[in-house]
Structures are given as structure tokens and as C-alpha cells.
Image: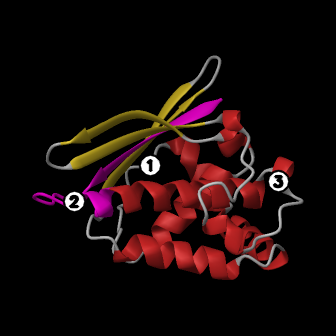
Amino acid sequence: MQAKLKLVFSEESRPLLLDISSLLYDFELLHDFSLILCAEDYSNYTFSRLFWFRNGRPIITDHRVRVARIVKESPLIIELVLAGISVGSGALWVLLQATEKIQNWRLSREKLKLEVEKLRMEKEKLKLELEQKIQQREAIHFFNSLITRLERLPMKLVDMEITLEGDDTHEKIIFG
């Protein structure tokens, strides 16, 4: 199973290239953080200042987030493909939790399909597990820094859509 994540950002007339590249890089960092935190393959990784560098995270090539499409018109739309390990390990859940924490990325959760209702029922348990993982891995500073970095960008997430694709399944989850 893999996931396709469609992100729609607020309209910005003539945004700075630096802001767009920072958004892409910071979202990559958030994905990698989520994966390192949740996937067993990265359980021996120790968070350090090297995490922030381009080659400071030992993510396996097949696990890296891929770009399906980028549309810079109005608004900016980015479609990403997340490897199955992101979905299966819980990294996708961490990524969604982070987007909830970013104060100026308010997304309406009322359009979620019944498949996601199961996650809602387990929300407190998953939230506690997330907090425990972050504490155990001594990564709270990294998590909070990622949230702050994404909050500071002028482009704000206004809509998000996740499509889960498996052998026989195709489930779309719409936020916004």
C-alpha cells in the first residue's frame, strides 16, 4: 500500500522561490521525521543536529517521498507519493498529527470517510504513543522545530487529500 498526498496552499501572488523551496524541504523533513520515529528500519537512528542537513537522515531510497505533481498557478498544489512503509508504520499518522499542531494550518476534519473513523476512536491512544515515541527518541526539540518552521512560511495549507492505494483498495480521504 502507498499513499498519495495532495496539498493545496493559500494563494500567494508571486511568492519567493526561497519560500517555496523552504516549504518543500521542511515538508520533506517532517516526512523523514515521521518515518524515522515510526518505522522499525530506523529504530537505531539517534536524532542530532545532522538531521537538518540534506544528507543527514539515512532514509532508504524506496522509502523517500516522491513528487507526483507540482502546480504553481493559484493556488500552489503539490502531490506527493508516500511509500508503503510510511502508511504501514504509522508515519502517515504522525504527519497528520503534525499538520493539526501547526496553528495556522487549520483543516476541517468533518469530511473524513468511515475508514478514518477507526483512527479517531484510537486518537488518544495514538497521541500518547506519539508523545512517548518522541520522548523515548529524545526528539521533542526536532518535532517542535519542524512545527515552528512550517508555521513561519507565508504559504498556509488550506486543503489536503490523501489517497490510500493498495492491491485491491483505493480510498480517498479529504480534509478541508
Above/below status of 108 relative to 72: below
Disc number for residue 10: 2
Comparing 29 with 54, the one in front is 54
Please give left or right for residue 92 compared with residue 19 in the image. right
Disc number for residue 42: 3
Identify the amino acid type marked 2: Ser
Mark 1 or 3: the one toward you: 3
Identify the amino acid type marked 1: Leu
Please give left or right for residue 16 compared with residue 114 in the image. left
Residues under numbered marks 1 and 3 in contact, where contact means CB atoms less than 8 Å apart: no
Image quadrant for the C terminus?
Answer: bottom left
Q: Residue at x 56, y 41 (%)?
A: 65
- Range drawn in magenta: 1-20
Packing grade of label 3 (10 A; few <14, some 14-19, many >=20) is some
Disc number for residue 22: none
Q: Residue at x 75, y 47 (%)?
A: 89
